[in-house]
Image (spheres, rainbow, N blue to C red):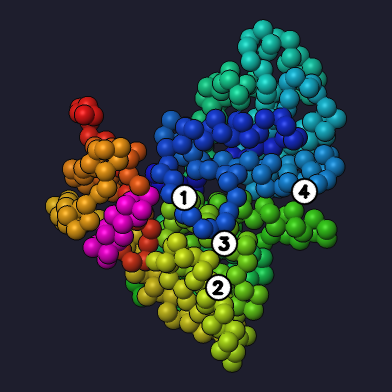
């Protein structure tokens, strides 16, 4: 499923109003193929989901800002950041607890935004409860209240049908030249994202165009180089405000997810002087959750150019952090001096070609047969696993369906073996490769 320009829907509300319950219900409808990458640390409070084949990104803000804080400040910060970064806001209140001063304060804040807000009264399980519990919330003076039971599903379909037209409206299409390579620059604040783009633009004689109407809360630059066109997406701009810095930086997930929804290739910048951090590994994790191609840029390499020991330590730390995604190219660069910049375009080109490559069905079936013959699958509960055929379902990233007699009986290690066979046999050494195992239809298990 492609998520170019996917809408970002944020869940906000006081603790224990049911944000996570609603999040889990919405995620169960997920159409995206999720490929959890072991060993990469990241939050699990967001997901790529869809309703009626309309994709969007869902974020549970309760999972982003867990700080011990007064409830009022806690929810105010969530609401402020969600209003700034999200396209659509689901504001949840607790129908059983009733209207609270915190709810009233946040509704006053939300009135000032032009973005679509759904005012949801949760924990209402039936029409009878709706008549009884919804009444106090009409005091808010909002145009519409949505009665819901995130736990039992009451009102859920009505809510999602109400959301649907707004997804269509916000799913904007960018008018870009054909075959434009979309590249997003991601990383922690001050790691050098904007400087890197400025250096790329200034390094060669290029045609650079600022695109109106497609910024989506990031800064986009359309660039032409050697007959190829690139859309460079800069996600810089996390604002720092005194003691709230840590809270605001946690919301960099929102900027990262929106950029990832629009790109083919994610360029994750790491600060050579500071080394790779947990937040870096989270950003790397986001790229793989969304199935994006990944290039890691170790920026500010000039600061350690004379320290061989530090170079070795840093490269080893990066290698360890991404050991489950070894296909991601790692480049040593400097936005300040221009070191390594000329290597970027050939690497982007190679990654982009692999990311969008298609293969003949006969060739991938021979590859599957050879892989199974070389290493037969183990028995599962006394039953031999069989693989009948494979077909490519899509690109960006390359996705293959493998038809088998027992999809649930495939051990992770054998799945990894087959994935590596596809990767090696098809020359996909720089991008994610995904296998989707399906049971052959029309046959009963014996």
Q: Foreground residue, 119 or 310?
A: 310
- Per the image, label 4 sits on a secondary structure element best described as loop
Circles 2 and 4 in contact, beta carbons < 8 Å: no
- Per the image, label 1 sits on a secondary structure element best described as loop
- The residue wearing badge 3 is 281
Q: Is residue 127 above or below residue 418?
A: above
Q: Position of residue 411 (x, y in %)?
A: 35, 47
Disc 3 residue crowd, few under 14, some 14–19, many 20+, Cα 10 Å:
many
Identify the magenta region: 412-427
Q: Position of residue 123 (x, y in %)?
A: 68, 21
Q: Main secondary structure of the magenta part?
A: helix
Q: Earlier in the sequence, mark 3 or mark 4?
A: 4
- The residue wearing badge 2 is 317
Q: Nearer the viewer, mark 2 or mark 4?
A: 2
Q: How many marks?
A: 4
Q: Earlier in the sequence, mark 1 or mark 2?
A: 1
Report if residue 144 is visible in the image.
no
Residue 67's disc number: 4
Q: Earlier in the sequence, mark 1 or mark 3?
A: 1
């Amino acid at each position: 499923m492609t998520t170019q320009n996917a809408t970002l829907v944020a869940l906000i509300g006081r603790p224990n109003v049911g944000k996570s319950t609603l999040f889990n219900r919405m995620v169960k409808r997920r159409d995206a193929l999720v490929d959890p990458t072991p060993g990469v640390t990241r939050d699990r409070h967001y997901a790529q989901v869809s309703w009626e084949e309309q994709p969007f990104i869902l974020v549970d803000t309760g999972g982003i800002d867990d700080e011990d804080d007064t409830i009022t400040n806690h929810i105010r910060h969530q609401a402020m950041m969600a209003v700034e970064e999200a396209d659509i806001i689901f504001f949840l209140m607790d129908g059983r607890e009733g209207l609270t001063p915190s709810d009233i304060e946040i509704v006053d804040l939300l009135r000032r935004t032009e973005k679509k807000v759904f005012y949801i009264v949760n924990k209402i399980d039936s029409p009878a409860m709706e008549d009884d519990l919804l009444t106090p919330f009409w005091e808010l003076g909002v145009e519409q209240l949505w009665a819901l039971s995130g736990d039992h599903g009451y009102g859920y379909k009505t809510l999602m049908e109400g959301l649907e037209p707004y997804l269509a409206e916000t799913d904007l299409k960018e008018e870009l030249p054909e075959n434009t390579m979309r590249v997003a620059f991601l990383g922690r604040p001050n790691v050098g994202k904007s400087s890197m783009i400025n250096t790329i633009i200034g390094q060669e004689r290029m045609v650079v165009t600022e695109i109106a109407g497609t910024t989506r809360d990031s800064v986009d630059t359309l660039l032409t180089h050697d007959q190829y066109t690139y859309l460079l997406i800069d996600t810089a701009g996390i604002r720092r405000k005194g003691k709230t810095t840590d809270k605001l930086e946690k919301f960099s997930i929102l900027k990262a997810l929106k950029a990832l929804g629009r790109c083919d290739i994610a360029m994750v910048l790491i600060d050579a002087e500071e080394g790779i951090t947990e937040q870096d590994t989270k950003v790397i994790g986001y790229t793989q959750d969304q199935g994006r191609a990944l290039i890691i840029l170790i920026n500010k390499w000039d600061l350690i150019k004379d320290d061989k020991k530090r170079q070795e330590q840093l490269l080893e730390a990066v290698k360890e952090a991404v050991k489950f995604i070894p296909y991601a190219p790692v480049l040593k660069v400097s936005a300040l001096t221009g070191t390594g910049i000329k290597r970027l375009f050939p690497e982007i080109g190679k990654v982009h070609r692999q990311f969008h490559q298609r293969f003949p069905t006969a060739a991938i079936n021979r590859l599957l047969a050879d892989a199974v013959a070389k290493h037969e699958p183990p028995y599962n509960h006394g039953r031999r696993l069989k693989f009948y055929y494979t077909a490519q379902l899509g690109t960006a990233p390359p996705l293959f369906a493998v038809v088998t007699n027992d999809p649930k009986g495939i051990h992770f290690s054998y799945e990894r073996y087959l994935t590596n066979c596809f990767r090696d046999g098809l020359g996909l050494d720089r991008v994610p490769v995904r296998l989707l195992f399906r049971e052959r239809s029309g046959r009963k298990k014996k």
